[in-house]
Image (cartoon, rainbow, N blue to C red):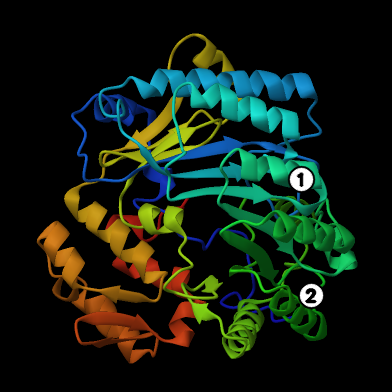
Amino acid sequence: MSTDTTTTTEIGSYFISNYPPFSQWSREQVPAAFEALDGEPDESIPLGMYIHIPFCRKRCKFCYFRVYTQQNAETIKNYVDTLDREVQLLKDRPGVAGRNLRFVYFGGGTPSYLSARQLKMLRDRLSASVSWDDAEEVTFECEPGTLSLEKVQTLKEIGVTRVSLGVENFNDKILEENGRAHLSPEILRAYDWIRQVGFPQVNIDLIAGMVGETDENWHACVEKAVELEPDNVTIYQMELPWNTTYSKEMLEHGIESPVADWPTKRRWASEAMDRMLEAGYEISSGNELVGNLETDHFVYRDNLFRGSDILAVGVSSFGHFQGVHYQNLDRIEDYMETVRSGALPINRALVPTDHQRLIREWVLQMKEGRVPAAPFREKFGVDPLVEFAEPLANQQKAGYLVVEDDVVQLTRKGLLQVDSLLTEYFEEEHREVRYT
């Protein structure tokens, strides 16, 4: 493995999911989030909800999310009660009242850690306050080993339209080494149940560059994914954010990064794209391939990238409402205590300027690989081809993108490392700061 610091997978997150960076959000700006929730809503902006379920069977060695392992039924019931209370507190705020949810995303953690009975209870409790019956998409993340046929049937019953199965790899040794709770027989069994019950959209996740990965095994994983014929395949390149088990081991013991270097991961991701394209898939973003670009949409992502309103529900959950970024309290005890006291659990926030909102939508949509300039002129009154002329010229010269017919189109080289390109569009004071 290369020890060159420009290619080695070092500690620190590459994955850009918002702007300005999370490290710039603060408690001082929390009042702005409340003002946004109480403001007159713009009915033309779609409204969605992100619900965080923080429970897992075990913590993966590469995980950096707020998760709690091996929790009992009483803890889960108390958490569901708190989610219900939080949604009650949100539903009557002037900016929310009377608006329909266009999309819902259950993320984690492991939402499928909940039992079928607990899932029905969650749906019944929340439906007294909000309805997703008419939503375009309700996505639910699943860990294969937590599923049963009854639970998959329950997901259909409570209105889930898009199941995302966290496969990551089909090799049991690699799954075990990286701390995954499931093994390959559970993947295949869960996938059969999902197909048997039937959902409009089924996604599977793979991770290129897990510890122990080889060329031969990666190609076998991609073949297996093609054979399963999901509607969407998401391919992540393994990173090492600060608070993962692997990162802590590296810092404590001074060991070299155990994760494949960036050129290797990019090659693996590119080889996966080639094989998926050959099998009839189309590229939807630098991470995602879909069976059909016309019909296979990821509504949550499309709205997140275009500044729609997203209500944050649950511990450490992120939201964006009426132009304000915010995040809930990130310790479950603090979160539950605050909500039970009758207060919304918002912990930090940030009010981006119009220019920062422009940058946010621009960099997020670049991850899709194709960005038309016209919608930005219309929405922001700014020509992005002029505003970002310098980084666009630099990146075109380096072979990462081309600008043609008023559209920025990333090349394969650019798509494979798009996150590393985005800071060049940031305002200068944010280019060197810690991201999270």
Residue located 78% across and 53% down the image: 144
Residue located 90% across and 66% down the image: 173
Residue located 47% across and 30% down the image: 328
Please give the residue where the numbered disc 2 appears in the rendered image.
213
Give the farthest residue toward the left. 381
Does 313 sit above or below residue 425? above
Foreground pick, 310 / 355: 310
What is the secondary structure assignment of the residue under circle 1? loop
Residue located 25% across and 80% down the image: 407
| Residue 130 horizontal side relative to residue 238, left or right | left
Does 146 sit above or below residue 1? above
- CB atoms at circles 1 and 2 under 8 Å apart? no
Does 283 sit above or below residue 357? below
Place of residue 45 in the rendered image (x, y in percent of width and height, measured from the top left)? 25, 45
- For label 2, the crowd category at 10 Å Cα-Cα, with few meaning under 14, some 14 to 19 and many 20 or more, is some
Foreground pick, 73 / 347: 73
Amino acid type of disc 1? Answer: Arg
Foreground pick, 52 / 435: 52
Does 317 sit above or below residue 378? above
Q: CA distance from mark 1 to mark 2?
A: 20 Å
Please give the residue where the numbered disc 1 appears in the rendered image.
59
Place of residue 8 in the rendered image (x, y in percent of width and height, measured from the top left)? 64, 74
Q: Is residue 333 something one can see in this rendering?
A: no
Amino acid type of disc 2? Answer: Glu
Q: Is residue 360 something one can see in this rendering?
A: yes
Q: Quadrant of the N terminus?
A: bottom right
Q: On the image, which quarter does residue 365 sit in?
A: bottom left
Foreground pick, 413 / 259: 413
What is the secondary structure assignment of the residue under circle 2? loop
